[in-house]
Amino acid sequence: MDEHESPELTEDEKRLFADLMPEDLNEILDTGVNRRHFLKLMTLAGGGILAAQSAVAEQLLTRPSNAPSPTELAPVSLDNAVNVSFKVNGTARKLTVDSRMTLLDALRERLDLTGSKKGCDHGQCGACTVMVNGHRVLSCLTLTASCEGKTVQTIEGLAQNDKLHPMQEAFLKHDGFQCGFCTPGQICSAVAMLDEAKKGQVSYVTENVRQTTGPAKLSNEEIRERMSGNICRCGAYPNIVAAIQEVYNGKPVEQIFRSV
Amino acid sequence: MRPFTYTRATDVTSAIRLLSQNPNARFLAGGTNLLDLMKEDVERPSTLIDISELGLTDIKSIASGTNKDGVTLGGLGKNTDAANHPLIRQHYPLLTQAILAGASGQLRNMATNGGNLLQRTRCPYFYEVAMPCNKREPGTGCGAKDGINRMHAIFGWSDQCVAVYPSDMAVALAALDAVIIVRNAGGQERRIPILDFHRLPDNQPEKDTNLVHGELITAIELPQNRFADKSYYLKVRDRASYAFALVSVAAALETEGNTIKQARIAMGGVAHKPWRALKAETMLVGKEATEANFKQAADAVMAEAKPLAHNAFKVELGNRSIVLALQMAMKGGKI
Protein backbone atom coordinates (compact mmCIF):
# COMPACT_ATOMS: atom_id res chain seq x y z
CA MET A 1 0.00 0.00 0.00
CA ASP A 2 1.24 3.49 -0.74
CA GLU A 3 2.47 5.32 2.31
CA HIS A 4 0.20 8.31 1.76
CA GLU A 5 -2.95 6.40 1.18
CA SER A 6 -5.26 6.33 4.16
CA PRO A 7 -8.44 4.48 3.47
CA GLU A 8 -11.00 4.61 6.21
CA LEU A 9 -11.27 1.94 8.83
CA THR A 10 -14.30 -0.32 8.79
CA GLU A 11 -16.76 -0.19 11.67
CA ASP A 12 -15.37 -3.39 13.11
CA GLU A 13 -11.84 -2.06 12.90
CA LYS A 14 -12.85 1.18 14.62
CA ARG A 15 -14.41 -0.77 17.44
CA LEU A 16 -11.33 -2.89 17.78
CA PHE A 17 -9.16 0.20 17.84
CA ALA A 18 -11.40 1.74 20.48
CA ASP A 19 -10.91 -1.32 22.58
CA LEU A 20 -7.18 -1.67 22.15
CA MET A 21 -6.01 1.94 21.99
CA PRO A 22 -8.86 4.19 23.13
CA GLU A 23 -6.51 7.14 23.69
CA ASP A 24 -5.50 7.12 20.03
CA LEU A 25 -8.93 6.63 18.53
CA ASN A 26 -9.96 10.25 18.01
CA GLU A 27 -6.73 11.16 16.38
CA ILE A 28 -7.02 8.24 14.07
CA LEU A 29 -10.59 9.04 13.10
CA ASP A 30 -9.83 12.78 12.69
CA THR A 31 -6.78 12.42 10.56
CA GLY A 32 -7.94 9.43 8.69
CA VAL A 33 -4.59 7.92 9.64
CA ASN A 34 -3.53 5.33 9.40
CA ARG A 35 -4.51 2.07 8.16
CA ARG A 36 -0.87 1.06 8.31
CA HIS A 37 -0.82 1.72 12.03
CA PHE A 38 -3.86 -0.45 12.41
CA LEU A 39 -2.48 -3.22 10.27
CA LYS A 40 0.76 -3.13 12.21
CA LEU A 41 -1.17 -3.47 15.40
CA MET A 42 -3.09 -6.40 14.02
CA THR A 43 0.14 -8.05 12.87
CA LEU A 44 1.51 -7.77 16.38
CA ALA A 45 -1.67 -9.22 17.76
CA GLY A 46 -1.45 -12.09 15.32
CA GLY A 47 2.15 -12.56 16.32
CA GLY A 48 1.17 -13.33 19.86
CA ILE A 49 2.64 -10.16 21.38
CA LEU A 50 -0.87 -8.97 21.98
CA ALA A 51 -2.26 -12.46 22.33
CA ALA A 52 -4.73 -11.50 25.02
CA GLN A 53 -6.07 -8.65 22.93
CA SER A 54 -6.28 -10.81 19.84
CA ALA A 55 -8.89 -12.92 21.59
CA VAL A 56 -10.82 -9.67 22.07
CA ALA A 57 -10.28 -8.87 18.41
CA GLU A 58 -11.72 -12.18 17.41
CA GLN A 59 -14.84 -11.55 19.46
CA LEU A 60 -15.27 -8.00 18.16
CA LEU A 61 -14.80 -8.82 14.55
CA THR A 62 -17.25 -11.67 14.66
CA ARG A 63 -19.88 -9.90 16.74
CA PRO A 64 -23.17 -9.09 14.95
CA SER A 65 -23.41 -5.35 14.27
CA ASN A 66 -26.31 -4.79 16.69
CA ALA A 67 -24.38 -6.23 19.63
CA PRO A 68 -23.56 -3.88 22.50
CA SER A 69 -20.09 -2.38 22.64
CA PRO A 70 -17.87 -3.58 25.48
CA THR A 71 -18.67 -0.63 27.71
CA GLU A 72 -22.35 -1.48 27.59
CA LEU A 73 -21.85 -5.03 28.78
CA ALA A 74 -23.05 -5.91 32.24
CA PRO A 75 -20.28 -5.16 34.75
CA VAL A 76 -20.10 -8.72 35.96
CA SER A 77 -20.10 -11.39 33.34
CA LEU A 78 -18.27 -14.52 34.29
CA ASP A 79 -17.31 -17.33 32.00
CA ASN A 80 -17.59 -20.68 33.72
CA ALA A 81 -18.25 -19.27 37.18
CA VAL A 82 -17.02 -21.34 40.11
CA ASN A 83 -17.95 -20.85 43.76
CA VAL A 84 -15.09 -20.97 46.22
CA SER A 85 -15.11 -20.85 50.01
CA PHE A 86 -11.76 -20.56 51.68
CA LYS A 87 -10.03 -18.94 54.59
CA VAL A 88 -7.74 -16.01 53.93
CA ASN A 89 -5.59 -14.68 56.77
CA GLY A 90 -7.95 -16.25 59.28
CA THR A 91 -11.17 -14.88 57.76
CA ALA A 92 -13.66 -17.07 55.91
CA ARG A 93 -14.27 -15.76 52.39
CA LYS A 94 -16.73 -16.75 49.69
CA LEU A 95 -16.18 -15.81 46.08
CA THR A 96 -17.68 -16.54 42.72
CA VAL A 97 -14.91 -16.43 40.17
CA ASP A 98 -14.24 -17.07 36.51
CA SER A 99 -12.64 -20.52 36.33
CA ARG A 100 -9.54 -18.84 34.91
CA MET A 101 -8.96 -16.52 37.86
CA THR A 102 -5.68 -17.21 39.61
CA LEU A 103 -5.37 -16.99 43.37
CA LEU A 104 -3.07 -14.00 42.86
CA ASP A 105 -5.73 -12.10 40.93
CA ALA A 106 -8.44 -13.06 43.43
CA LEU A 107 -6.31 -11.78 46.31
CA ARG A 108 -5.41 -8.53 44.60
CA GLU A 109 -8.50 -7.73 42.56
CA ARG A 110 -11.31 -9.23 44.59
CA LEU A 111 -10.07 -9.22 48.18
CA ASP A 112 -7.97 -6.05 48.07
CA LEU A 113 -4.95 -7.89 49.41
CA THR A 114 -2.41 -6.20 47.19
CA GLY A 115 0.69 -7.23 49.13
CA SER A 116 1.25 -10.26 46.92
CA LYS A 117 2.77 -8.94 43.73
CA LYS A 118 2.35 -9.90 40.11
CA GLY A 119 5.85 -10.01 38.71
CA CYS A 120 6.36 -12.48 35.88
CA ASP A 121 2.91 -14.13 36.23
CA HIS A 122 4.55 -17.40 35.10
CA GLY A 123 5.92 -18.91 38.30
CA GLN A 124 9.44 -17.72 37.70
CA CYS A 125 9.99 -14.77 40.05
CA GLY A 126 8.33 -15.66 43.36
CA ALA A 127 6.85 -12.18 43.95
CA CYS A 128 3.40 -13.78 44.32
CA THR A 129 4.46 -16.32 46.98
CA VAL A 130 1.78 -17.05 49.59
CA MET A 131 1.13 -19.98 51.89
CA VAL A 132 -1.68 -22.40 51.12
CA ASN A 133 -2.41 -24.91 53.89
CA GLY A 134 0.91 -23.87 55.44
CA HIS A 135 3.06 -24.48 52.35
CA ARG A 136 4.61 -21.73 50.27
CA VAL A 137 3.27 -21.77 46.72
CA LEU A 138 3.02 -19.46 43.73
CA SER A 139 -0.37 -17.80 43.66
CA CYS A 140 0.03 -16.90 39.97
CA LEU A 141 -0.01 -20.59 39.05
CA THR A 142 -2.80 -21.51 41.47
CA LEU A 143 -6.38 -21.38 40.29
CA THR A 144 -8.71 -19.80 42.83
CA ALA A 145 -11.16 -22.56 41.98
CA SER A 146 -8.70 -25.11 43.34
CA CYS A 147 -8.56 -23.39 46.75
CA GLU A 148 -11.94 -24.64 47.95
CA GLY A 149 -11.76 -25.37 51.67
CA LYS A 150 -8.12 -24.34 51.92
CA THR A 151 -6.31 -21.88 54.16
CA VAL A 152 -4.40 -19.05 52.55
CA GLN A 153 -1.93 -16.80 54.32
CA THR A 154 -0.52 -13.70 52.67
CA ILE A 155 1.93 -11.02 53.75
CA GLU A 156 -1.04 -9.10 55.21
CA GLY A 157 -1.66 -11.98 57.61
CA LEU A 158 1.83 -12.10 59.12
CA ALA A 159 1.70 -9.10 61.43
CA GLN A 160 -0.47 -9.34 64.53
CA ASN A 161 -2.23 -5.99 64.70
CA ASP A 162 0.60 -3.47 65.13
CA LYS A 163 3.21 -6.07 65.89
CA LEU A 164 5.26 -7.08 62.88
CA HIS A 165 6.28 -10.65 62.27
CA PRO A 166 9.94 -11.22 63.30
CA MET A 167 10.83 -11.76 59.64
CA GLN A 168 9.32 -8.39 58.74
CA GLU A 169 11.28 -6.77 61.58
CA ALA A 170 14.47 -8.43 60.39
CA PHE A 171 13.97 -7.32 56.79
CA LEU A 172 13.54 -3.76 58.04
CA LYS A 173 16.58 -3.93 60.30
CA HIS A 174 18.80 -5.39 57.57
CA ASP A 175 17.43 -3.25 54.77
CA GLY A 176 16.41 -6.39 52.89
CA PHE A 177 14.75 -4.53 50.07
CA GLN A 178 15.36 -1.86 47.51
CA CYS A 179 12.25 -1.09 45.52
CA GLY A 180 10.32 -3.50 47.74
CA PHE A 181 8.29 -5.06 44.96
CA CYS A 182 9.54 -8.59 45.59
CA THR A 183 9.66 -8.18 49.39
CA PRO A 184 6.22 -9.58 50.34
CA GLY A 185 6.99 -12.73 48.37
CA GLN A 186 10.50 -12.92 49.85
CA ILE A 187 9.15 -12.61 53.38
CA CYS A 188 6.36 -15.18 52.92
CA SER A 189 8.87 -17.51 51.32
CA ALA A 190 11.41 -17.00 54.11
CA VAL A 191 8.84 -17.64 56.86
CA ALA A 192 7.70 -20.88 55.21
CA MET A 193 11.27 -21.89 54.41
CA LEU A 194 12.32 -21.71 58.08
CA ASP A 195 9.40 -23.95 58.89
CA GLU A 196 10.54 -26.42 56.21
CA ALA A 197 14.05 -26.42 57.69
CA LYS A 198 12.62 -26.99 61.16
CA LYS A 199 10.85 -30.08 59.83
CA GLY A 200 14.21 -31.36 58.59
CA GLN A 201 13.63 -30.84 54.88
CA VAL A 202 16.77 -30.99 52.76
CA SER A 203 17.90 -29.05 49.69
CA TYR A 204 20.08 -29.67 46.64
CA VAL A 205 23.08 -28.26 48.53
CA THR A 206 22.53 -30.35 51.68
CA GLU A 207 25.71 -32.36 52.09
CA ASN A 208 24.14 -35.62 53.18
CA VAL A 209 20.47 -36.10 52.42
CA ARG A 210 20.52 -39.56 54.03
CA GLN A 211 21.04 -38.06 57.47
CA THR A 212 17.48 -37.82 58.70
CA THR A 213 17.70 -36.61 62.28
CA GLY A 214 16.62 -33.19 63.45
CA PRO A 215 16.13 -29.83 61.80
CA ALA A 216 18.17 -28.78 58.78
CA LYS A 217 21.15 -26.55 59.50
CA LEU A 218 21.00 -23.39 57.45
CA SER A 219 24.28 -22.04 56.13
CA ASN A 220 24.16 -18.95 53.93
CA GLU A 221 24.52 -21.31 50.97
CA GLU A 222 21.48 -23.29 52.14
CA ILE A 223 19.44 -20.09 52.53
CA ARG A 224 20.38 -18.93 49.04
CA GLU A 225 19.44 -22.27 47.50
CA ARG A 226 16.17 -22.51 49.40
CA MET A 227 15.25 -18.92 48.55
CA SER A 228 16.20 -19.29 44.88
CA GLY A 229 12.55 -19.32 43.80
CA ASN A 230 12.37 -15.67 44.84
CA ILE A 231 14.46 -14.53 42.03
CA CYS A 232 14.59 -10.76 42.49
CA ARG A 233 18.24 -10.09 43.33
CA CYS A 234 18.91 -13.78 42.69
CA GLY A 235 17.98 -14.95 46.19
CA ALA A 236 21.55 -14.14 47.13
CA TYR A 237 21.08 -10.59 48.25
CA PRO A 238 23.25 -10.44 51.38
CA ASN A 239 20.83 -8.31 53.39
CA ILE A 240 17.99 -10.76 52.84
CA VAL A 241 20.22 -13.65 53.83
CA ALA A 242 21.31 -11.72 56.95
CA ALA A 243 17.69 -11.03 57.89
CA ILE A 244 16.75 -14.67 57.52
CA GLN A 245 19.83 -15.78 59.51
CA GLU A 246 18.79 -13.44 62.33
CA VAL A 247 15.31 -14.96 62.61
CA TYR A 248 16.67 -18.47 62.14
CA ASN A 249 19.30 -18.12 64.88
CA GLY A 250 17.14 -16.01 67.16
CA LYS A 251 20.02 -13.63 67.87
CA PRO A 252 21.22 -10.40 66.31
CA VAL A 253 23.24 -10.61 63.10
CA GLU A 254 25.50 -7.73 62.17
CA GLN A 255 23.96 -5.33 59.70
CA ILE A 256 25.97 -5.72 56.52
CA PHE A 257 25.50 -2.13 55.40
CA ARG A 258 27.06 -0.91 58.66
CA SER A 259 30.02 -3.26 58.47
CA VAL A 260 31.32 -1.99 55.15
CA MET B 1 -6.10 -17.83 29.06
CA ARG B 2 -8.97 -19.21 27.03
CA PRO B 3 -12.21 -20.09 28.79
CA PHE B 4 -12.54 -23.59 30.20
CA THR B 5 -14.89 -25.41 32.52
CA TYR B 6 -13.49 -26.46 35.87
CA THR B 7 -14.53 -29.67 37.62
CA ARG B 8 -13.35 -31.08 40.92
CA ALA B 9 -13.06 -34.83 40.71
CA THR B 10 -14.21 -36.69 43.78
CA ASP B 11 -12.86 -40.17 43.07
CA VAL B 12 -10.33 -41.81 40.78
CA THR B 13 -12.84 -43.75 38.70
CA SER B 14 -15.03 -40.80 37.81
CA ALA B 15 -11.99 -38.58 37.20
CA ILE B 16 -10.66 -41.03 34.62
CA ARG B 17 -14.10 -41.43 33.07
CA LEU B 18 -14.53 -37.65 32.73
CA LEU B 19 -11.14 -37.31 31.07
CA SER B 20 -11.61 -40.17 28.63
CA GLN B 21 -14.98 -38.78 27.50
CA ASN B 22 -13.45 -35.52 26.33
CA PRO B 23 -10.35 -35.40 24.12
CA ASN B 24 -9.92 -31.71 25.00
CA ALA B 25 -10.02 -32.23 28.76
CA ARG B 26 -6.89 -32.24 30.92
CA PHE B 27 -6.20 -33.32 34.46
CA LEU B 28 -5.15 -30.46 36.74
CA ALA B 29 -2.89 -31.51 39.61
CA GLY B 30 -0.12 -29.11 40.69
CA GLY B 31 -0.78 -26.97 37.64
CA THR B 32 2.74 -25.53 37.60
CA ASN B 33 3.36 -26.42 33.97
CA LEU B 34 -0.20 -26.70 32.62
CA LEU B 35 -1.39 -23.27 33.79
CA ASP B 36 1.78 -21.65 32.50
CA LEU B 37 1.22 -23.26 29.08
CA MET B 38 -2.42 -22.14 29.12
CA LYS B 39 -1.36 -18.56 29.85
CA GLU B 40 0.99 -18.78 26.87
CA ASP B 41 -1.86 -20.18 24.74
CA VAL B 42 0.14 -23.34 24.04
CA GLU B 43 -2.33 -25.59 25.86
CA ARG B 44 -6.01 -24.90 25.16
CA PRO B 45 -8.08 -27.38 27.15
CA SER B 46 -11.86 -27.02 27.13
CA THR B 47 -12.16 -28.63 30.56
CA LEU B 48 -9.87 -28.99 33.57
CA ILE B 49 -10.55 -31.90 35.88
CA ASP B 50 -8.97 -31.07 39.24
CA ILE B 51 -7.58 -34.32 40.62
CA SER B 52 -5.53 -32.80 43.42
CA GLU B 53 -7.86 -34.00 46.17
CA LEU B 54 -8.02 -37.65 45.10
CA GLY B 55 -5.44 -38.97 47.55
CA LEU B 56 -2.84 -41.15 45.77
CA THR B 57 -0.17 -39.43 47.86
CA ASP B 58 1.23 -42.31 49.91
CA ILE B 59 4.87 -43.29 49.93
CA LYS B 60 5.32 -46.82 51.19
CA SER B 61 7.47 -49.89 51.11
CA ILE B 62 6.04 -52.43 48.73
CA ALA B 63 6.65 -55.19 51.29
CA SER B 64 5.39 -53.28 54.25
CA GLY B 65 7.95 -52.07 56.70
CA THR B 66 10.91 -53.93 55.24
CA ASN B 67 11.73 -52.13 51.98
CA LYS B 68 12.48 -55.64 50.76
CA ASP B 69 11.03 -55.04 47.38
CA GLY B 70 11.22 -51.33 46.85
CA VAL B 71 9.00 -48.34 47.38
CA THR B 72 5.97 -46.82 45.66
CA LEU B 73 5.30 -43.11 45.35
CA GLY B 74 1.72 -41.93 44.89
CA GLY B 75 1.15 -40.24 41.54
CA LEU B 76 -0.44 -37.21 43.21
CA GLY B 77 2.09 -36.84 46.02
CA LYS B 78 3.99 -33.57 46.04
CA ASN B 79 7.59 -33.43 44.83
CA THR B 80 8.66 -31.91 48.17
CA ASP B 81 7.21 -34.83 50.09
CA ALA B 82 8.81 -37.40 47.79
CA ALA B 83 12.24 -35.77 48.10
CA ASN B 84 12.04 -35.54 51.88
CA HIS B 85 10.45 -38.86 52.78
CA PRO B 86 12.77 -40.92 55.03
CA LEU B 87 12.39 -44.02 52.81
CA ILE B 88 13.44 -42.09 49.73
CA ARG B 89 16.27 -40.22 51.44
CA GLN B 90 17.63 -43.43 52.92
CA HIS B 91 17.24 -45.86 50.03
CA TYR B 92 17.04 -43.62 46.93
CA PRO B 93 19.08 -40.49 47.76
CA LEU B 94 19.70 -40.09 44.00
CA LEU B 95 15.99 -39.38 43.57
CA THR B 96 15.99 -36.89 46.44
CA GLN B 97 18.91 -35.01 44.90
CA ALA B 98 17.34 -34.99 41.44
CA ILE B 99 13.99 -33.67 42.64
CA LEU B 100 15.70 -30.97 44.69
CA ALA B 101 17.82 -29.98 41.69
CA GLY B 102 14.65 -29.03 39.85
CA ALA B 103 12.53 -25.90 40.09
CA SER B 104 12.18 -23.98 43.39
CA GLY B 105 10.78 -24.65 46.85
CA GLN B 106 7.45 -23.09 45.90
CA LEU B 107 7.12 -25.13 42.71
CA ARG B 108 8.11 -28.40 44.36
CA ASN B 109 5.44 -27.77 47.01
CA MET B 110 2.87 -27.61 44.21
CA ALA B 111 4.12 -30.06 41.59
CA THR B 112 3.09 -33.70 41.81
CA ASN B 113 5.13 -36.80 41.01
CA GLY B 114 2.93 -37.81 38.09
CA GLY B 115 2.76 -34.25 36.80
CA ASN B 116 6.53 -33.93 36.94
CA LEU B 117 6.82 -36.79 34.44
CA LEU B 118 4.28 -35.13 32.15
CA GLN B 119 5.87 -31.69 32.05
CA ARG B 120 6.53 -30.46 28.57
CA THR B 121 9.65 -29.14 26.94
CA ARG B 122 10.76 -25.58 27.66
CA CYS B 123 11.99 -25.15 24.07
CA PRO B 124 11.35 -21.44 23.35
CA TYR B 125 10.03 -22.25 19.88
CA PHE B 126 7.43 -24.51 21.50
CA TYR B 127 6.46 -21.79 23.98
CA GLU B 128 6.17 -18.94 21.47
CA VAL B 129 2.99 -19.50 19.51
CA ALA B 130 4.13 -17.22 16.68
CA MET B 131 6.96 -19.62 15.90
CA PRO B 132 6.73 -22.83 13.92
CA CYS B 133 6.83 -25.94 16.10
CA ASN B 134 5.96 -29.49 15.15
CA LYS B 135 5.43 -30.40 18.78
CA ARG B 136 2.84 -27.68 19.30
CA GLU B 137 1.35 -27.66 15.80
CA PRO B 138 2.31 -30.71 13.76
CA GLY B 139 3.36 -29.89 10.22
CA THR B 140 4.46 -26.30 10.88
CA GLY B 141 8.17 -27.11 11.00
CA CYS B 142 10.85 -26.79 13.68
CA GLY B 143 12.17 -23.33 14.50
CA ALA B 144 14.92 -24.69 16.70
CA LYS B 145 16.67 -27.10 14.35
CA ASP B 146 18.26 -24.29 12.37
CA GLY B 147 17.56 -21.61 14.96
CA ILE B 148 18.99 -20.87 18.39
CA ASN B 149 19.50 -24.39 19.68
CA ARG B 150 22.06 -24.01 22.44
CA MET B 151 19.80 -25.71 24.99
CA HIS B 152 18.67 -28.48 22.65
CA ALA B 153 19.22 -32.18 22.02
CA ILE B 154 22.41 -33.95 21.06
CA PHE B 155 20.93 -37.46 21.11
CA GLY B 156 17.88 -39.02 19.51
CA TRP B 157 16.50 -35.91 17.80
CA SER B 158 14.76 -35.99 14.43
CA ASP B 159 14.36 -33.47 11.63
CA GLN B 160 10.92 -32.84 13.11
CA CYS B 161 12.04 -31.85 16.61
CA VAL B 162 15.23 -31.18 18.57
CA ALA B 163 13.62 -30.27 21.91
CA VAL B 164 14.83 -31.71 25.21
CA TYR B 165 12.73 -33.12 27.98
CA PRO B 166 13.06 -30.92 31.09
CA SER B 167 12.46 -33.11 34.18
CA ASP B 168 15.29 -33.85 36.61
CA MET B 169 13.20 -36.30 38.61
CA ALA B 170 12.65 -38.50 35.55
CA VAL B 171 16.39 -38.74 34.91
CA ALA B 172 16.92 -40.25 38.36
CA LEU B 173 13.89 -42.50 37.84
CA ALA B 174 15.47 -43.69 34.57
CA ALA B 175 18.66 -44.61 36.41
CA LEU B 176 16.63 -46.36 39.11
CA ASP B 177 14.58 -48.51 36.69
CA ALA B 178 11.30 -47.06 37.94
CA VAL B 179 7.97 -48.41 36.70
CA ILE B 180 5.08 -46.02 36.04
CA ILE B 181 1.68 -47.40 36.99
CA VAL B 182 -1.30 -46.00 35.14
CA ARG B 183 -5.02 -46.73 35.26
CA ASN B 184 -7.52 -46.37 32.42
CA ALA B 185 -11.27 -45.84 32.12
CA GLY B 186 -11.93 -49.58 32.20
CA GLY B 187 -10.22 -49.73 35.59
CA GLN B 188 -7.27 -51.69 34.19
CA GLU B 189 -3.76 -50.99 35.37
CA ARG B 190 -0.79 -50.83 33.06
CA ARG B 191 2.86 -50.93 34.15
CA ILE B 192 5.19 -48.90 31.95
CA PRO B 193 8.96 -49.08 32.54
CA ILE B 194 10.27 -45.51 32.72
CA LEU B 195 12.48 -46.01 29.66
CA ASP B 196 9.35 -46.80 27.60
CA PHE B 197 7.29 -43.99 29.08
CA HIS B 198 8.72 -41.02 27.16
CA ARG B 199 9.22 -41.07 23.40
CA LEU B 200 11.85 -39.86 21.00
CA PRO B 201 10.37 -37.32 18.58
CA ASP B 202 10.58 -39.29 15.30
CA ASN B 203 7.73 -38.05 13.11
CA GLN B 204 5.34 -37.44 15.99
CA PRO B 205 7.01 -34.95 18.33
CA GLU B 206 3.58 -33.79 19.52
CA LYS B 207 3.39 -37.03 21.49
CA ASP B 208 5.66 -36.69 24.52
CA THR B 209 4.82 -40.03 26.12
CA ASN B 210 3.22 -43.38 25.45
CA LEU B 211 0.40 -42.55 27.82
CA VAL B 212 -3.05 -42.90 26.21
CA HIS B 213 -5.58 -40.10 26.71
CA GLY B 214 -7.78 -41.24 29.59
CA GLU B 215 -4.99 -42.82 31.61
CA LEU B 216 -4.01 -41.53 35.06
CA ILE B 217 -0.59 -42.02 36.66
CA THR B 218 -1.53 -43.57 39.99
CA ALA B 219 1.94 -44.50 41.24
CA ILE B 220 5.64 -44.74 40.53
CA GLU B 221 7.33 -47.91 41.64
CA LEU B 222 11.00 -48.03 42.59
CA PRO B 223 12.53 -51.50 42.67
CA GLN B 224 14.97 -52.34 45.41
CA ASN B 225 18.62 -51.72 44.55
CA ARG B 226 22.07 -51.48 46.10
CA PHE B 227 22.92 -48.01 44.82
CA ALA B 228 22.07 -45.94 47.88
CA ASP B 229 25.68 -45.83 49.14
CA LYS B 230 27.12 -44.67 45.84
CA SER B 231 24.96 -42.38 43.76
CA TYR B 232 24.93 -38.74 42.72
CA TYR B 233 22.81 -36.38 40.65
CA LEU B 234 24.93 -33.74 38.95
CA LYS B 235 23.15 -30.85 37.30
CA VAL B 236 25.06 -28.37 35.16
CA ARG B 237 23.20 -25.17 34.36
CA ASP B 238 23.75 -21.56 33.43
CA ARG B 239 23.34 -20.33 37.02
CA ALA B 240 23.79 -22.03 40.38
CA SER B 241 20.12 -22.70 41.02
CA TYR B 242 16.59 -22.65 39.65
CA ALA B 243 17.40 -23.18 35.97
CA PHE B 244 16.96 -26.04 33.55
CA ALA B 245 19.89 -28.34 32.90
CA LEU B 246 22.33 -27.85 30.09
CA VAL B 247 23.42 -31.36 30.98
CA SER B 248 22.60 -33.49 34.00
CA VAL B 249 23.82 -36.93 35.00
CA ALA B 250 22.27 -39.43 37.37
CA ALA B 251 25.06 -41.82 38.32
CA ALA B 252 24.82 -44.87 40.55
CA LEU B 253 27.29 -47.63 41.32
CA GLU B 254 27.35 -50.85 43.22
CA THR B 255 30.88 -51.93 44.04
CA GLU B 256 32.74 -54.72 45.75
CA GLY B 257 35.98 -53.30 47.01
CA ASN B 258 36.89 -51.03 44.11
CA THR B 259 35.35 -53.33 41.49
CA ILE B 260 32.14 -52.21 39.83
CA LYS B 261 29.35 -54.79 40.06
CA GLN B 262 26.61 -52.65 38.56
CA ALA B 263 26.46 -49.15 37.10
CA ARG B 264 23.71 -46.75 36.12
CA ILE B 265 24.14 -43.63 34.00
CA ALA B 266 21.21 -41.52 32.82
CA MET B 267 21.42 -38.05 31.34
CA GLY B 268 19.08 -35.07 31.26
CA GLY B 269 19.08 -32.01 29.02
CA VAL B 270 20.42 -33.97 26.06
CA ALA B 271 17.43 -35.69 24.45
CA HIS B 272 13.67 -35.81 24.06
CA LYS B 273 13.56 -38.25 27.01
CA PRO B 274 15.83 -39.26 29.89
CA TRP B 275 18.86 -40.68 28.09
CA ARG B 276 20.04 -43.91 29.64
CA ALA B 277 23.55 -45.01 28.68
CA LEU B 278 23.09 -48.79 28.73
CA LYS B 279 26.20 -49.69 26.74
CA ALA B 280 28.46 -47.60 28.92
CA GLU B 281 26.95 -49.17 32.02
CA THR B 282 27.77 -52.64 30.71
CA MET B 283 31.31 -51.53 29.88
CA LEU B 284 31.89 -50.57 33.50
CA VAL B 285 30.79 -53.88 35.01
CA GLY B 286 33.77 -55.85 36.31
CA LYS B 287 36.11 -52.88 35.93
CA GLU B 288 37.86 -50.93 38.65
CA ALA B 289 36.23 -47.66 39.68
CA THR B 290 38.99 -45.45 38.33
CA GLU B 291 38.98 -42.12 36.53
CA ALA B 292 40.39 -43.80 33.41
CA ASN B 293 37.55 -46.30 33.26
CA PHE B 294 34.96 -43.61 33.94
CA LYS B 295 36.49 -41.59 31.10
CA GLN B 296 36.29 -44.57 28.78
CA ALA B 297 32.59 -45.01 29.60
CA ALA B 298 31.93 -41.30 29.09
CA ASP B 299 33.73 -41.37 25.73
CA ALA B 300 31.53 -44.27 24.66
CA VAL B 301 28.35 -42.37 25.58
CA MET B 302 29.34 -39.13 23.92
CA ALA B 303 30.72 -40.76 20.76
CA GLU B 304 27.11 -41.16 19.68
CA ALA B 305 26.24 -37.48 20.17
CA LYS B 306 25.04 -35.50 17.14
CA PRO B 307 25.27 -31.85 18.16
CA LEU B 308 23.42 -29.02 16.46
CA ALA B 309 24.87 -25.68 15.37
CA HIS B 310 24.94 -24.09 18.84
CA ASN B 311 25.29 -26.96 21.29
CA ALA B 312 28.49 -28.76 20.39
CA PHE B 313 29.78 -27.68 23.82
CA LYS B 314 27.42 -30.24 25.35
CA VAL B 315 29.58 -33.09 24.05
CA GLU B 316 32.64 -32.16 26.11
CA LEU B 317 30.42 -30.94 28.97
CA GLY B 318 28.53 -34.24 28.97
CA ASN B 319 31.76 -36.22 28.89
CA ARG B 320 33.22 -34.41 31.91
CA SER B 321 29.88 -34.47 33.72
CA ILE B 322 29.63 -38.26 33.45
CA VAL B 323 33.14 -38.68 34.88
CA LEU B 324 32.49 -36.21 37.70
CA ALA B 325 29.08 -37.71 38.55
CA LEU B 326 30.60 -41.21 38.77
CA GLN B 327 33.42 -39.87 40.97
CA MET B 328 30.92 -38.12 43.20
CA ALA B 329 28.87 -41.31 43.38
CA MET B 330 31.97 -43.15 44.61
CA LYS B 331 32.24 -40.57 47.41
CA GLY B 332 28.78 -41.51 48.57
CA GLY B 333 27.02 -38.67 46.79
CA LYS B 334 28.11 -36.10 49.36
CA ILE B 335 28.90 -32.71 47.98
Image (cartoon, rainbow, N blue to C red):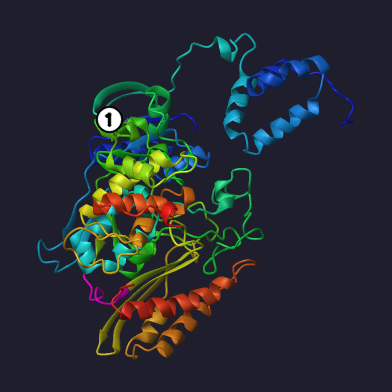
Magenta-highlighted stretch: main secondary structure?
A: loop
Residue at the image point whose x is 52% and y is 69% from the top:
B155
**Vertical relation: A193 (above or below) A121:** below
Q: In x, y percent, where is residue A139?
A: 38, 37
Side of B81 relative to B145 (left or right): left
Side of B310 relative to B327 (left or right): right
Does the magenta segment cover residue B228? yes
What chain does badge 1 belong to? Answer: A
Which residue type carries mark 1? Answer: Asn
Q: Can you see residue B204? A: yes
Does the magenta segment cover residue B122? no
Side of B45 relative to B132 (left or right): left
> Residue beneath label 1, please?
A89
Residue at the image point whose x is 45% and y is 75% from the top:
B321
- Towards the viewer: B325 or A42: B325
Q: In x, y percent, where is residue B55?
A: 21, 44
Span colored in magenta: B224-231
Q: Count the numbered circles shown.
A: 1
Side of A65 relative to A158 (left or right): right
- Towards the viewer: A44 or A1: A44
Q: Callout 1: helix, strand or loop?
A: loop
- Towards the viewer: B89 or B65: B89
Residue at the image point whose x is 53% and y is 12% from the top:
A73
